[in-house]
Image: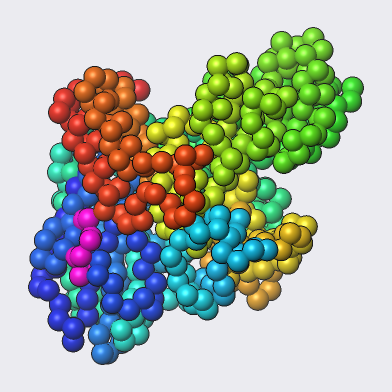
Amino acid sequence: MLLVVACLRPPSRAAPLVAIVDDSERIARRDGDRAVLRGVGNPVWAPGQPVRLFGLPGETVALQVVVTAAQEPLRGVTVELPALEGPVRLANQGSGRFQPIERFVVAELELRRRSGGRHAGESLGWAPGAMPPGPRPPTEVPEPLIPIELAPPWADYPMTVAPGEHRVVWIDLTLPEQGLPPGVYRGELRVAAGAKELARQPVLLEVGHLRLPYAAVRTMVYYDPQEIRGVTGSDEAVRHYLQLMHRHHLSTIFRIDGPADVAAQRDELTGALFTAAHGYDGPGAGRGADVIALGTYGSLGMPTPERLGRIEQTMRALEEAGVLASRPTVFLYAADERCDSPAGPAWRTALDGSASPQVRAVLVGHTCSASPLEQRVDLAMVHAAAYNPVQAERAVRLGKRVWIYNGSLPATGSFLTDGGVLSLRANGWIQARYGIERWFYWESTFWNDDNRGGHGPYDPLLVAETFHNHHGDWANGDGVLVYPGRQVAAGRRSLGFAGVIASLRLKQWRRGISDAGYLQLCRQAGGEVARQAEAEAARLIPRALSQAEPGPAPWPQSGAPYVAARRRLFDLLHQKAPPLPAR
């Protein structure tokens, strides 16, 4: 998809500036002069030139509109992109929560200190020497993306831009999987400050022929329904969370300890929640769960006859609901970060003794960073810093499953807010390049720091620091990929919205997963297309995982190389342009 945005005239230093950047930037309010806003190193736009974005049906392409005030403040600043006209019309319809053109105010959180731990220069998100460049605290960091239609007064939309400062509007352009012919789509981006027009810019959108695979690389993200209900006061917020994550190509898990949990999340597990009947519009429509965890973090304890019976009842409930028809991966999460736990082997023995073949087929797994060859479970979930592709491949040949969890620089990207804006984008490429079956992230709704050593409740819409433990670690953004749309606790920031809102990091992970879809399509094409695509991925990610050397991450820290790599894959795929395959 090609998006073109051209300024009417290059702004002078004395005039307000309207610039366009892609989704690889994090532009803070007080960042000062940024070369990318003048077109330097900007992969999609330069003054007087069109912005070029490209994409496939089923993909979401994003851009950011950055408005910078000169000597005088700007008030009542609005950004609009009403429609895109082409072979068909792309425009918002009705009042549905999910639309093809979505605008967000980029809000900021208080960053009081960089993430850290017991030893200087390291944290849960990076090893010594690998801390990425970042803002100097105390400052603010752009992170929550607030839908413009829901923006409360504290989010300040229409925006006020102080002299010399920036304000940013993020725009998602979601291309339908079905019924979107290839071609060029045209629109007009309008930026105004009250009655004064700041920019009126043409938008061109190039849509390719091939459909982007949904969830091209597999993930597993934990969430806590009780946490969502407790903070927002709404069951609807849980459903919206699930739809939002699904729309970002992510698979979610929660703790299923018995058949009542299956009944409570039946629509999510079957895929009914992701249909128009439930207000869903977007990629992956109707797809049910591809991964199901029985118990999480060892919640089931050691096996007993009663607990085994509960597992048998749960599997019957999943079968009766039709969930198992799509052959999801079902596993029992026996223990968490205890390699010596006897729970895994004990549960394997207990399941093998069941009369039910479906129960016997359930995998037993745990998180443990020892070599998967040594682990006495079916499924080894290995921390990113310890994941060794050679060991993983050998374990798979022996019949085991090996997944990765969390992230730590320089082995992989970091999930932390101050862990590098492109970390999660890089993870999508790493997963695709090294053939990692599934990427597990430990939590996405950690809005109460109740971990052992934690600091208790906090306002996730105000502060960036989310996590503390009894080892002395603290982290910005750890365990939080979405933010509450409503907070019922007095004094907390709230949008008054019975749902959740996305983080900038969530958008980055979606982008990396979508990039992996390009690589998947090239591999399916085979031959020279596949060979050149593999070479492109190797250039972008020269080393990762256990191959990474101490120090900074070896992959690019600016967006241009990622855009260029994806464009080359796009061009490889469209040397031949077969019609869209039947669904």
What is the quadrant of the C terminus in the image?
A: top left
Residue 256's place in the image compared with 467, above or below, is above
Q: Position of residue 356 (x, y in %)?
A: 75, 11
Q: Is residue 32 visible?
A: yes
Answer whether residue 39 is magenta in the image.
yes
Looking at this view, is 38 or 10 the one in front? 38
Looking at this view, is 34 or 102 the one in front? 34
Q: Residue furthest bottom?
A: 71
Q: Position of residue 377 (x, y in %)?
A: 71, 25
User: Is 41 left, or right, of 396 in this rendering?
Assistant: left
Answer whether residue 420 is magenta in the image.
no
Q: Residue at x 22, y 61 (%)?
A: 41
Residue 335's place in the image compared with 68, above or below, is above
Location of residue 448 by image quarter: bottom right
What is the quadrant of the N terminus in the image?
A: top left
Q: Is residue 257 visible?
A: no
Q: Residue at x 35, y 85 (%)?
A: 162
Region rendered in magenta = 37-44
Q: Residue at x 55, y 58 (%)?
A: 128
Q: Residue at x 59, y 51 (%)?
A: 444
Q: Position of residue 125 (x, y in %)?
A: 56, 55
User: Is 319 left, or right, of 306 in this rendering?
Assistant: left
Location of residue 248 by image quarter: top left
User: Is 163 left, or right, of 109 in this rendering?
Assistant: left
Residue 54's place in the image compared with 350, above or below, is below
